[in-house]
Image: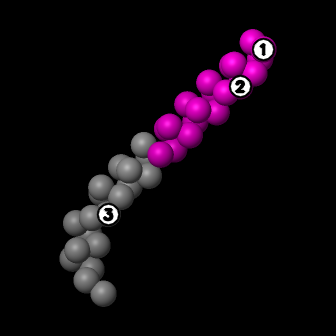
Amino acid sequence: MDFALMQRVLPFFLEAAWVTVQISALALILGLAVAAIL
């Protein structure tokens, strides 16, 4: 396994994972807000 490559890619992977978590949380909040209004 190429650990040097993994070390270079890891920050981008973690940033992408964090963005995914943020989008999921935003979708959950918006969904609950819309459901509460309806």
How does the figure colour the protein chain or chains?
one colour
What residue is pinned by disc 3?
10
Q: Residue 11 versus residue 38: which sits nearer the camera? A: 38
Coordinates of residue 20 in the picture (x, y in percent): 47, 46
Quarter where residue 38 is shown: top right
Q: Are marks 1 and 2 in contact (CB under 8 Å)?
A: no
Judged by its main secondary structure, the magenta piece is: helix
The residue at the point 38 percent across, 55 percent down is 14
Q: How many marks?
A: 3
Which dot, 3 or 2, sits closer to the camera?
2
Compared with 36, 24 (above or below) is below
Secondary-structure class at tag 2:
helix
Q: Which residue is mark 2?
A: 32
Residue 11 in the image: x percent, y percent? 30, 57
Q: Nearer the viewer, mark 1 or mark 3?
A: 1
Please tell me how crowded label 3 is: few (under 14), some (14-19), or many (20+) other residues with Cα within 10 Å. few
* Tag of residue 29: none
Three-letter code for the amino acid on which mark 1 is drawn: Leu
Estimate the x, y position of residue 8 in percent, counting from the top left. Answer: 22, 66
User: Which span of residues is magenta-colored?
Assistant: 20-38
Q: Quadrant of the N terminus?
A: bottom left
What SS does tag 3 mark?
Answer: helix
What label sits on residue 38 in the rendered view?
1
